[in-house]
Amino acid sequence: MLAIGLIKESAKFALSALKDNRTRTLLSLLGVTIGILTIIGVFSAVDTLRNNIEDSVKKIGSNTLYVQKWPWTGGPDFPWWKYLNRPEPKYEDYLMLKERITTADKIAYMIDIGNSTIKYKNNNASGVSISAGTQDQYSIQNLNVEKGRYFVESETRAGSLVTVLGAVIAEGLFPNSDPLGKYVNMLGRKVQVIGVLKKEGEGVLINTSPDNSAFIPFELARNLVNYDNFSPSIAVRVMSKYSLAEAESEIKVLMRSIHRISPQREDDFSINQTTMITSQLDKMFGIVNLAGFCIGIFSILVGGFGIANIMFVSVKERTHIIGIQKALGAKNFFILSQFLIESIVLCLLGGAIGLSIVFLITLLVKIGTGLAIVVSIKMVLLTVFISTLIGLISGIVPALMASRLDPVEAIRSK
């Protein structure tokens, strides 16, 4: 109880000293505030980007494998010449794979006809990605129809002149009317709009949002374009009871059999999955986090040195008072705790101001752009811990020096 009472009295003296020297206190906070702002800002930006990418990955399909010509891996040492002469996956490959595969829940053949134009009367939508696929594309890509319906199996097989529009495309072509049942011009044909997808917003990854896309049956696209020119892919959603590794092994064996590849030859196809993207991005995020943390720590250390300097000045100014306190019976612990608490409070205030600025920026960004910034509780706790630690480190030497002053010499200092 005595120790708690001493700490309370020390805290009163410390807060009184901070209040009496407001300008100095404010200047002392700047270094710590900037450091905390840097650390939390960088971590929050990275966490926000990671969350958005994870949402984009869900749209691609986290339990989905893609058989394609090109692998998703990249980098400066990417051996592009090995893949240049590979064949594109054929529709016939898809039919044979669908017939033989045992690990697939859904399987679809898909192409994206990019940079297309869709017209309705005097309204044009340019730069549209027309996605053509077989029936299971709807389930694999988790498409969400808000108005109307998706095309049925009979329309898919017949290549019917029907389309489902993304929300942004529908808004642009039909600003004041219901698009359902209307006919739009695309790929040189009049196609009936039978559905409109729910608006999802832009994803971080390219081509993950359906808002700027239009969907048509693959058989229709096959009659209108040479689908080999549009990087076709076979998408396989794996049954929950199988792992991606098991499904990948089966697909590899079946595709080698379908392409009649001899044992000594390499694969002429790639099996891609979203973990390839996320693993590369995790490395990048790790570097960004480390860089931001290092910059923030240096800023905080500079702020810590500033606070230590201020504490030395504070000890010098209050030497006479310390001498009086000691003459009246104040223990070394009481003097030590005064200056330590003052130093810690300075750093905690700096951390609180930095965190408040981050939350303010977060609020402004959300209001201005609608983007939700992630500030995790882990980062808040890290702020408190770092601020307290820096306060202890910055204040320990001045506090020890103050606690060891000789009371007679301290009183004479004035």
Image (cartoon, rainbow, N blue to C red):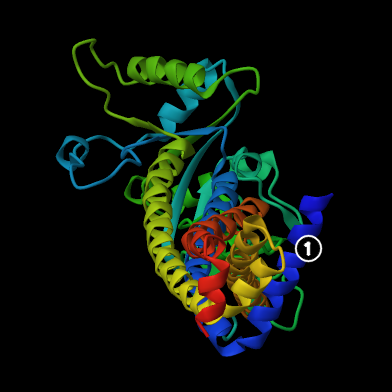
Q: Vertically, is 18 above or below 294?
A: below
The foreground one among 348 and 81 is 348
Task: Tell me residue 159's x, y (percent).
Answer: 57, 47
Q: Residue at x 65, y 79 (%)?
A: 17
Left or right, 219 with reference to 341 = left
Task: Tell me residue 198's x, y (percent).
Answer: 71, 61
Task: Tell me residue 147's x, y (percent).
Answer: 78, 61
**Residue of label 1:** 8
Q: Vertically, is 387 above or below 137?
A: below
Task: Tell me residue 401's x, y (percent).
Answer: 49, 63
Three-letter code, disc 1: Lys
**Secondary structure beneath label 1:** helix
Q: Which residue is drawn at 41% across and 16% down?
A: 254
The foreground one among 316 and 224 is 316
As drawn, which residue projects farthest toward the top?
263
Q: Which residue is drawn at 38% across and 57% down?
A: 294
Image-quadrant location for residue 327: bottom right
Q: Which residue is drawn at 43% across and 73% down?
A: 309
The foreground one among 322 and 287 is 322
Left or right, 134 with reference to 274 = right
| Residue 343 visible in image | yes
| Residue 203 visible in image | no
Q: Vertically, is 240 above or below 173?
A: above
Image-quadrant location for residue 137: top right
